[in-house]
Image (cartoon, rainbow, N blue to C red):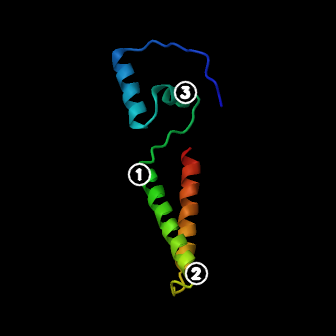
Amino acid sequence: MRKRNTTIAIRCTDEESRHIHELAERHGLKLNDFVIRCALGKKIVVANGVDEIVRQQKAIGRNLNQIATLANMDRLTAVNFQPLLDEHTKVTELIGQLLREVK
């Protein structure tokens, strides 16, 4: 883990300070992280709602696993749900790609 142990102080107007704080908040970052990313030219991306999508995708995966378990125990006669499982896998991979690009 990185240890940030150096302080850089800058002066700005009240208006500039408010604007910088608003931008950091809008991007969902702490002021420190926002300023460092800007100064180092890193891309800042706002991806609202991704956490909810990931949560729902995990719930769907758990449900598919429960169905598969019941089918393997012969407690459930299931129609071929392999296409659904394949689609779930594709969507999960796309979400993973998106999250890697956002970070």
Q: Mark 2 points at which residue?
A: 73
Observer-side mark, 3 or 2, equals 2
Residue 49's mark? 1
Residue at 39% over, 26% down: 21
Residue 83 in picture, x, y percent from top left = 55, 79
* Quarter where residue 37 is shown: top right
Q: Name the residue under label 3.
A: 36
| Mark 3 or mark 2: whose residue is earlier in sequence | 3
Residue at 49% over, 30% down: 34
**Tag 1 and tag 3, C-beta contact below 8 Å:** no
Residue 84 in picture, x, y percent from top left = 52, 76
Please name the amino acid that badge 3 sits on. Answer: Ile
Within 10 Å of disc 2 (Cα), the crowding (few <14, some 14-19, many 20+) is few
Residue 64 in picture, x, y percent from top left = 52, 72
Out of 87 and 13, give the one closest to the viewer: 87
72 vs 58: above or below: below
Residue at 34% over, 19% down: 15
| Mark 1 or mark 3: whose residue is earlier in sequence | 3
Instruction: Label 1: state its secondary structure.
Output: loop
Kindly report the distance in space between the C-alpha atoms of the residues bearing marks 1 and 3.
24 Å
81 vs 17: above or below: below
Out of 29 and 72, give the one closest to the viewer: 72
Please name the amino acid that badge 2 sits on. Answer: Met
